Amino acid sequence: MMPWLEAFHRPTTIAEALRLMKRGGRRARFVAGATDLLVEADPAARILVDVGRLGLAYIKPHRGGWRIGAATTMAMLEQSEGMRAFAGGILARAAAASGSIQIRNRATAGGNLANASPAADLAPPLLVLDAQVVIAGQKGKRRLPLADFFKGVCQTALKGDLLMEIILPPLNRAAGRRGGERSAWSFQKLGRVESDIAIVNAAAGVGVDAGGRCRWARIAVGAVAPTPLRIAAAESALQGRPLDSESIALACETVCREARPITDLRASVDYRRQMSGVLVRRALEECLAGIEPPRH
Amino acid sequence: MRRDKPKTPERGRKGLSRRDFFRGAGVAVPTGLLASQAKAPKAAKAPAGAAPMLGPGRVPITLRINGKVEKLELEPRVTLLDAMRNYLDITGAKKVCDRGTCGTCTVIMGGDAVYACQVLAIEAQGKAITTIEGLNAGEQLHPMSQAFVNNDAQQCGYCTPGFVVACKAFLDKHPNPTREQIRRGLGGNLCRCGTYTGIERAVLEAAKAVKGGSAHA
């Protein structure tokens, strides 16, 4: 595999990693689990800079939210008690669906985002959680919303810089939570089999007031546009309405309209468009079931 | 059946290695990088096996496979699978898809099932690696392998070494598995003969055997 590789670096500091990357220019790639890299086998990638020794594999509580190191593996995410409990465990669920166990033991959260596949399974849940990413560059660190990180198919705002960390803000702040509010979250994925690459994936979160009215909604879909997308129009379709089958249907219609899928060997444009609505419906229905008061 | 070891790494039967080809194609740039990096104080201070700049030529790589320390000199591009099959004659892990899909190359690395075709040998250092060859105690089959025999869990047998290793890693983490957990947990291995129901039974049987302490699990 990749017989053209010329050099492999194992830096132990972020400064050194950045320097090596800069010197390698277009020929250099950061590598973590290598599960995408060795399969894509891009002949332009001649120099690899391993990020496995930079101390970036961690999941830490942070001001009511979480900090996730870029080198955290999918297996770590799915097994983390904290991630399984946070926001209905949608990030742990997405990680658990992101490939076979052999892949998940190697693939990393940072790699999933930096590779910028439109079908990245972590992207929709992170988008609805209002995640931010911390990027280390020559001029220091910068922080930006994940929504601004994706620039196109396999294109990101990184431009040779290093994705260091993913920050999950506390839920109450992310959602503008107020008294009496109940919230629920969901992740949905459609693949030929679950561990396969997503034909469509989706995540949703909703908060409803005591009267069952939707205060806020967050909806994101993947694999139906050049980048994973938050669908703001569908979110506002729910806001202020009772969360029921009628409002959910309206939101799903909006999702189908906003989706800009392509046809590839896995699915056609029409199928993807229709399934984006179906997956969001499943997600919102799961949310609805999750916030219903317990029946006696 | 042991094959002759290649006289020099990377040299195929035709005499011209891929490395020769790429060198011939004028890939000279990294040599300069290598020289400058070797002088850097960081490289000198780094612990063994952690030098920051490696390749394109062969570098010392130490692997711990089935309890045995193997010292090799390999190019950084060589995968763990190729290192085992081409340089160590550890051929239990099979090379089929070579792109992280089929599972025939599954090994246990640091307690986790991984595809050996998706791990560079240089990255596999410092972790205990177990292949199908390392499961048995002498002539006695590991309970997982024995359960495959008992349950007719193989037909052509080509996926079997990877499957048995994946099952062992799965059982280590799920000692009391449900059928649903087995199906999900072993989704990373393919059997084109379709022996999945036998494998499912084998995992359930091995789970009982391991708990019964009937063998060296």
Image (spheres, rainbow, N blue to C red):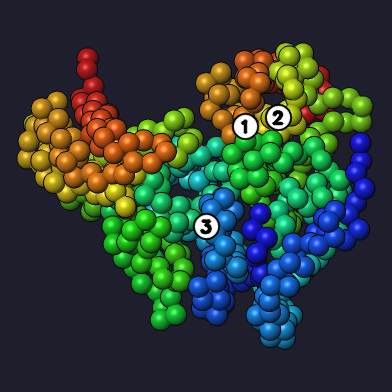
Q: In which quarter of the image is residue A6?
A: bottom right
Q: Residue at the location (41% across, 81% down)?
A: A139
Q: Mark 1 points at which residue?
A: B189
**Chain on which label 1 sits:** B
Residue A55 seen in the current view: no
SS of the residue under disc 1: loop
Q: Name the residue under label 2.
A: B159
Q: Quadrant of residue B151?
A: top right
Q: Rounded to the nearest whole Å, what is the CA distance between mark 3 and mark 2?
A: 31 Å
Q: Nearer the viewer, residue B42 or A174?
A: B42
**Chain on which label 3 sits:** A
State left or right for residue A269 relative to residue A19. Answer: left
SS of the residue under disc 3: loop
Nearer the viewer's eye, disc 3 or disc 1?
1
Q: Which of A185 and A4 is in front in this view?
A: A4
Q: Where is residue B121 in the image (x, y as percent from the top left)?
A: 72, 56
Q: Residue at the location (65% across, 36% down)?
A: B103
The kind of residue on which mark 3 rests is Ala
**Contact, CB < 8 Å: mark 2 with mark 1?**
yes
The kind of residue on which mark 1 rests is Asn
Q: Residue at the location (44% across, 80% down)?
A: A138
SS of the residue under disc 2: loop
Q: Rounded to the nearest whole Å, what is the CA distance between mark 3 and mark 1?
A: 25 Å
**Contact, CB < 8 Å: mark 3 with mark 2?**
no
Q: Mark 3 points at which residue?
A: A71
Q: Where is residue A156 in the image (x, y as percent from the top left)?
A: 37, 63
